[in-house]
Amino acid sequence: MYKHWYQQFNQYHADTLWFTAHSHHFWPDVTQQAMNRYWHDSARLVDDKWQHIFSSIIPKAQRHISRILNYPYPEQITFAPSTHELLVRILSCFPPQKKLKILTTNAEFHSFSRQLKRLIEEKWINATIINTEPFDSFIERFYQASNNKKFDIIFFSHVFFNSGYVVQDLNEVAEKLSPLCSLFIVDGYHSFAAIPIDLSEIANNIFFLAGGYKYAQAGEGCCFLLSPPKANKLRPWNTGWFANFSQLEENEQTVTYDNYGQRFAGATFDPTGIYRLNAVFDLWQENKLTVEAVHQHVLALQQVFLQSINNSNHPLLNYRNLLYIPEYVHGHFLTFKLADRAICKNLSMALNSLKVKVDCRGNRLRFGFGLQHDLEDINQLLARLKRLPNV
């Protein structure tokens, strides 16, 4: 149904099945045209290109993201090369001498968890870290940890990268927890453009981080932050010249910021990712493709895979090792939790020898499904799994 959108990527992978779509989706062909468009804009406008980017390219991307998330404040969306840059900028809204109290989980992506560990080493942060497993009691345990405490930051992923578990009822969670902290932050990288999300009712309370590298199929360098209007009084001390782009020529004695979300901007960056993001979502709009339709496409492929796994006698790729709760909304990848890191690595290498690309994170093997796949890809995958040796 959608495979013809990816002819440029597919031409290099006639014999290889890439099931790493949770990490790196194929880019549709329109993204190559978008990169050429940026080159020509640079040649045509030279130094004036930034006016064009901030007046046309970025507002268009803001509108696309707002439509997808049903977010009422497109002007509150800020772009940066990585979510890590945006995260550190949010942290810098607090005084440098303040020891922050943070509530989070043990399943956050490296850009947050590594930074958190380093700041704990420096005794700048006091963190309460809640285990995500068992999943069916996670939210209740997270609520209990927040009781009778006032946190500076509550941070968690909407979809956990090492399991695919989705925090159910995000709006309810936000309503309960956002009053208990100064900043309520959700990492939405594994849900944006994959799981249907409606932020309209919680837009005034949530900081939402995501980007184009994964399910948006726009590649790296295009991450963004949705900040609530009440954040427009914050003054991050980690700041760059784009945070005051509209007032550059004014010689003021104090550091000032642009209005709205732009106050969280940094400095010069490569905007090709934003061009690619616009191209992808233009393609979706032209074809009336919604996140709901994407989600249903992936679920249909996953069900074929799951049915086969359920009937399989493989000692590792079986339901006993699968992190999956059928009655829950689930992310667009399926995770097998294996006994140890060595087994996971060996299984990944065995799959690679069959020209099946998956990834291994610690003791967890992940299969990602996306628009680039069709039923024939799943059938080929299942046929190759039957040839998989015991490892």
Image: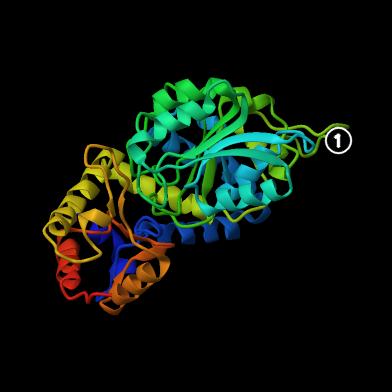
**Camera sees residue 322:** yes
19 versus 269 height, above or below: below
Residue type at mark 1 is Asn
Counting from the top left corner in percent of width and height, residue 274 is at 50, 50
Counting from the top left corner in percent of width and height, residue 52 is at 58, 45
Counting from the top left corner in percent of width and height, residue 106 is at 50, 46
Residue under label 1, please give it. Answer: 251
> Who's the residue at 46% across and 27% down the image?
143
352 versus 371 height, above or below: below
> Who's the residue at 36% across and 50% down the image?
163
Quadrant that contains the N terminus: bottom left
Helix or strand or loop: what does disc 1 sit on?
A: loop
Instruction: From the viewer's side, name the closer residue of 135 and 88.
Output: 135
Q: Going by the image, does 363 lie left or right of 100? A: left
Counting from the top left corner in percent of width and height, residue 264 is at 65, 38
Q: Quadrant of residue 354?
A: bottom left
> Who's the residue at 35% across and 74% down the image?
346
**Camera sees residue 51:** no
